[in-house]
Image (spheres, helix red, strand yellow):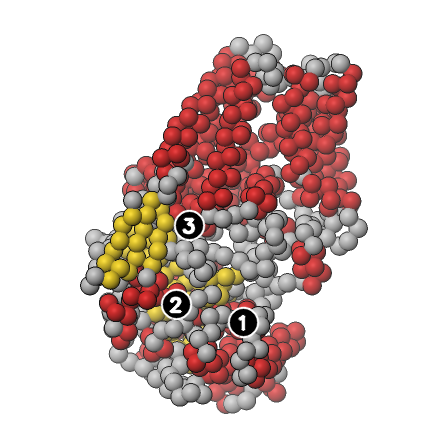
Amino acid sequence: MSTTTTHNDLPLHTHKRSRRTTTNRVFAVVHSCAILALLYRHALSLLHSTSLTSFFITLTFLISDSILAFMYSTAQSPRMTPIYRKEFPENLKRVVKESDFPALDMIICTADPFKEPPMNVVNTALSVMAYDYPTDKVSVYVSDDGGSALTLFAFMEAARFASHWLPFCRENSIVERCPEAYFETDHSRLPEADKIKIMYQGMKVMVNNVIERGKVGDEYITGERERLAFRKWTDGFTRQDHPTIIQVLLDNSEDRDIADNSMPNLIYVSREKSRTSHHNFKAGALNALLRVSATMTNAPIVLTLDCDMFSNDPQTPHRALCYFLDPKIQSELGYVQFPQRFRGIDKSDMYASENRRLFEINPQGMDGVLGPNYVGTGCFFSRRVFFGGPSKFLPPENPQLGPNNVVDKPIQSLEVLELAHHVAACNYEKNSNWGSKIGVRYGSLVEDYFTGYHLQCEGWKSIFCNPDKPAFSGDSPINLIDVLNQTKRWAIGLLEVCFSRYSPITFGIKSMGPRMGLAYCYGFWAIWSIPITAYAFLPQLALLNGLTIFPKVSEPWFLLYVFVFIGAYFEDLLDFHSIGVTFQKWWSDQRMWLIKGLSSFLFGSIEFFFKSFGIATLGFNVTSKVLDEDQSKRYEQGSMEFGVPSPLFVPLTTAAVVNLAAFAWGHVEVFRGSNGLEGLLMQMFIAGFGIANCMPIYEGIIRSDKGKIPTKITLVSTFIAFALYAAAYVTLRN
């Protein structure tokens, strides 16, 4: 089925249902019945347990398989009605005059100039400043939550470079409007490109020199206006304690590029910080920018971007407008979400950094109901969405911050700047609805999930826009510890929502209906750690002690296990195949799911448990975007990067040791005739499957470069493996 939305007989967008919809539904019913039969067997075995050991083993598998069944059933919701959309931006100007296009406020967040290099943020800003969009309707706000003079300096230089870069892109119809991405490609066909490249490289060297020195030297300050700006960094200025800094770097009513065209607005913002006030991390920064942008431009459309997620297509705003300007859906449309895509991914995507299920497969399925979740970047919002549901407007405490307020004063006027500084104060939100009922929502480390979830519970719908040419492209971590720490942070934040009064099982289903409520239950993903940990150790420890705990090959229950296992993996493989993902990348995704289950999900669950009881844990950490040359080389060679001693690696290495020992001992048992292969086959298969997924761990143990698993981690893990075996020996033999 295909649906076309037209306006004045010209289509703005179409959508069609996936051909796999019926197949997905039928298989979900059959596979669910098989899983229920398996749970029935566990319950039956539990009732007929003849010893404490068998009772414990059966109970463990009943709990583990119940969790697997719950997560599987919730994952079926997005599979019921996936849809595919197509936009026609070429028709937009025939339907709406360009002069009637809504203004855009684009918000970019950064927090640490040493983990998030300012040149990355600069490239992101330049790529959206160069959109094929009326420049008098474009404003770019850079939130520097680290309050760094280094970041401000980088953007002062970027403002100068933009006067050359923007007309160069427009006049030559450049598609890659991120300078770094453009100059990595062949640009020899344009003679003026060499001149622009020299300018860009000069800016890059200058900014990187300042970053390396850690301060902006007097030799880099060229005017009194800049000198006054940097004087705000006094001796008592720290990233945790400083006043609000708002610097208008480009003003479209005054600044012109070298072709005498107006420039888009470019505003640097560092909200006030105080050690006595809680700042709510990125969510707080976003709300501060929503207020500041409201006082200065108050555009009806707001784009949120991560600092390293640059624009990959200058027509992207037009694609979003194909939906926002459709009168049939306009009143209930809250946001248009584009998928996250990444550049420089190795051919196997060994860390599963693309997260295709999270960023593409699930959103396509949710789009067939109320729309995709918000994933934190690459999202165009209607400003109205932050002030209550479609039928229940919640006015802000100051009418000038409302979505319908028209700013009729210059952005550099004293009145506007005073109000902007006022709303960026660290205590401004006290006794207000910001973060609870309006704006980006507080209460979770994953403010994107929590906010999108809340907006849809309030009645807003969303659209998943996934064009053939990725709209945005960013950088991903190239070492395992960054991947695992990032996933652990997500796991904790998701659990904060799922075990709160806003749980998707209760609040979500009541507000959005069963299908959307269940679709948001992926937030429970940290509990994957329970079955993954159980299957990573218990069958293997039983095998090492010669104990059979699964059905024999000749028993009918064996076929049920085979069907459930193969069915789940094959269904997942088809999902990835449907969006053009290679088998190799799919396998990496499966392997990383198991690795995360034994590390990020496990430690995230433990940390959440501690936080729930008021036990202090580590705080929020920014994922490093700095690319180390040696790490990059090992990444390109396909070697997983360990390098640092981390508790996250201990259960991984322990599982690798236990699975290898169990697999080897299983063969010994078969050859000795102590136990037949028929009885041990399933346990040997699980151990062998574990070995196949642990191959990067074994490589990390025997490697000699700096990226190897630290020796003390290997020793600790081996000791724990022996301790587990000893404990199992005493328990199982008795």
Quadrant including the C terminus: top right
Residue type at numbered disc 1: Tyr
User: Visible in this render: residue 321?
Assistant: yes
Tell me if 705 is positioned left or right of 351 in this view. Answer: right
Q: Position of residue 222 (x, y in %)?
A: 55, 89
Tell me if 587 is positioned left or right of 713 in this view. Answer: left
**Any mark on residue 449, and which?**
3
Q: Quadrant of residue 209?
A: bottom right
In front of the other: label 3 or label 2? 2
Assign a secondary structure to mark 1: helix
Pointer 2 local density, CA inside 10 Å: few below 14, some 14–19, many at least 20: some
Q: Position of residue 551 (x, y in %)?
A: 59, 16
Q: On the image, numbered disc 2 is attached to which residue?
A: 315
Relative height, residue 652 to residue 124 (above, below) = above
Q: On the image, numbered disc 1 is attached to which residue?
A: 182
The residue that appears at 63% across and 28% down in the rendered structure is 686
Q: CA distance from mark 1 to mark 2?
A: 16 Å
As rendered, which of 165 and 204 lies closer to the eye? 165
Q: Earlier in the sequence, mark 1 or mark 2?
A: 1
Residue type at numbered disc 2: Gln
Pointer 3 local density, CA inside 10 Å: few below 14, some 14–19, many at least 20: many
Pointer 1 local density, CA inside 10 Å: few below 14, some 14–19, many at least 20: some
Tell me if 384 is positioned left or right of 230 in this view. Answer: left
Residue sticking out furthest to the front: 189
The residue that appears at 67% across and 39% down in the rendered structure is 694
Residue type at numbered disc 3: Tyr
The residue that appears at 32% across and 66% down in the rendered structure is 90
Q: Position of residue 229 (x, y in %)?
A: 49, 82
